[in-house]
Structures are given as C-alpha cells and as structure tokens.
Amino acid sequence: MYLPEHFKPEETADLTALIEQYPLAMLIVTGNDGELEVNHIPLEYEQEDTSYGLLKGHIAQANPLAGLLSEARSVYAVFQADQAYISPNWYEGKQLHHRVVPTWNYRVVHVKGKIRKVDDEKYLRGILARLTRTHEAAQVVPWKMGDAPNDFIEAQLGKIAAIEIEIESMIGKFKVSQNRSEADAQNIAQGLIDSCPDMAASVLKFQPAKDEAHKKTPD
C-alpha cells in the first residue's frame, strides 16, 4: 500500500479503534488452486498482551473458505472506515491561482495474520453472543440468542463455524487532508459536514500540529 509518512497513523490505538467501529472486514485468502477467496465478514478485535491481538468471527460451513481452513493459512483483512470525495472548490488556492485538483479521502486498516477454523461450540457461542450484544446495544429492546427457540439455535449453529485470526502485522492509512493547510482543512470539514460528517470529524481530528511545516507532498 502506498503510504506517505503524513498519512500513517502514529498510534496503534487509532487502528484498533477503527476496527472496532467498522468491523466488517474484507478477508482475502489464497485457495489451493491459486485463486483468491474473498469474503466480507464482521470481526471482533481482542487485545493480547504479547502480540497485536486476535480477530474473531464466524462463517457458513457451506462457504468455500471453510474448506480451506483444515490448517492455519495466511490471510489479509482490510477494514474501511469513512471515505469521501474532496472538491478543489474547498481549497484556498482555487480562488487565487486555480492550481488545484480533486482527491479522495479515506481511512483504512490492513491486517496480515494466520486464519484458522475453531471447532468448538462454546467458543462459537461466545463470539455470537458478543457480536449481538455489541450491535444490538442501540435497540430499544436488544435481541439476544435466548429469544430464539433452543432447537432453532442448535440447527443454526450446525451451519456455521468459528474463525480466529492471529494478527502478525497491522498498518493503517488515514488520508484525511493532513497535507493541506489549516485553512483548507477547515474548509474541507465544513464542505463535508452534511454529506459525510464522519470524514469531516476525521479531517479535524487528525490534522498535524499547527507548528508543523505545511506539507505539499502529492496524494
């Protein structure tokens, strides 16, 4: 991934926060035939004291990925957060010299690791319980697994498998106008406030310190 230094997040906590807020990952695994197997799976992040941590989720037993995981294999996971088109109209230079062009802002985290299938119903139930508890929290009456009949849940559990990814490396790219002036950043945030408030907030949050030299590195 092309990663100019000013778009590289300095804090690991910013990477894990993105994963927790935007948990739908694009998982990329190379199959036995050399073809790529690509899936979109929500994953939970679990911190480990001695490593980058773990990602946990589940897949359908009918998913071709399940058949590849008789042993651990390499996986690439991509998490994408807010993203938005940036108009040259929001740059001060547009009014002065017109030597400006559009770009695209985005925040992503790339994770490399080893993925394996976990054949343990208790482990699977724990993943499902935490997943629903987290994402049902905003509901007036949150749904829980116990709301469904036991025989129905048992049947559904037989159709899915737990997966676990041991993270070996984690890198992020937060391209949120850090190479623009403070005035440009303010204008960009204002321009995005209605159409993409998350990106507007990111532009303001991740701006370099005021005394840092203004960067002119291309996107």
Image (cartoon, rainbow, N blue to C red):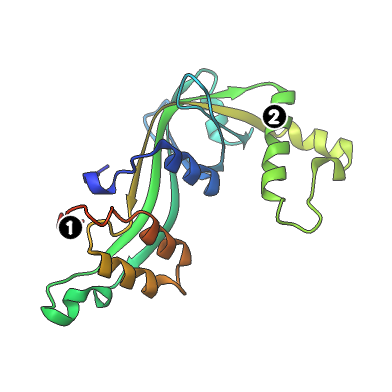
Q: Nearer the viewer, residue 195 or 211?
A: 211
Give the number of marks.
Answer: 2
Q: Are marks 2 and 1 in contact (CB under 8 Å)?
A: no
* 29 over 178 or under it: above or below: above
Q: Nearer the viewer, residue 23 or 213?
A: 213
Q: Nearer the viewer, residue 139 or 43?
A: 139
Q: Local crowd at mark 2 within 10 Å, few (<14), some, or many (≥20)? A: some
Hey, which quadrant is residue 28 in on the image?
Answer: top left
Residue type at mark 1 is: His
Residue drawn at 28 percent across, 59 percent down: 177
Q: Secondary structure at mark 1?
A: loop
Q: Position of residue 207 (x, y in %)?
A: 32, 56
Q: Which residue matches tag 2? A: 124
Q: CA distance from mark 2 to mark 1?
A: 50 Å
Q: Position of residue 208 (x, y in %)?
A: 28, 53
Q: Position of residue 131 (x, y in %)?
A: 67, 41
Residue drawn at 71 percent across, 34 percent down: 159
Q: Which residue matches tag 1? A: 214
Q: Which mark is residue 103?
A: none
Residue type at mark 2 is: Leu
Depth check, mark 2 against mark 1: the one in front is 1
Q: Earlier in the sequence, mark 2 or mark 1?
A: 2
Q: Position of residue 104 (x, y in %)?
A: 30, 62
Which residue in the rendered view is the most extreme toward the front?
211
> Which image quarter holds the N terminus?
top left
Res. 39 in view: no
Residue drawn at 85 percent across, 40 percent down: 146
Res. 43 in view: yes
Hey, which quadrant is residue 155 in on the image?
Answer: top right
Residue drawn at 40 percent across, 71 percent down: 192
Q: Local crowd at mark 1 within 10 Å, few (<14), some, or many (≥20)? A: some
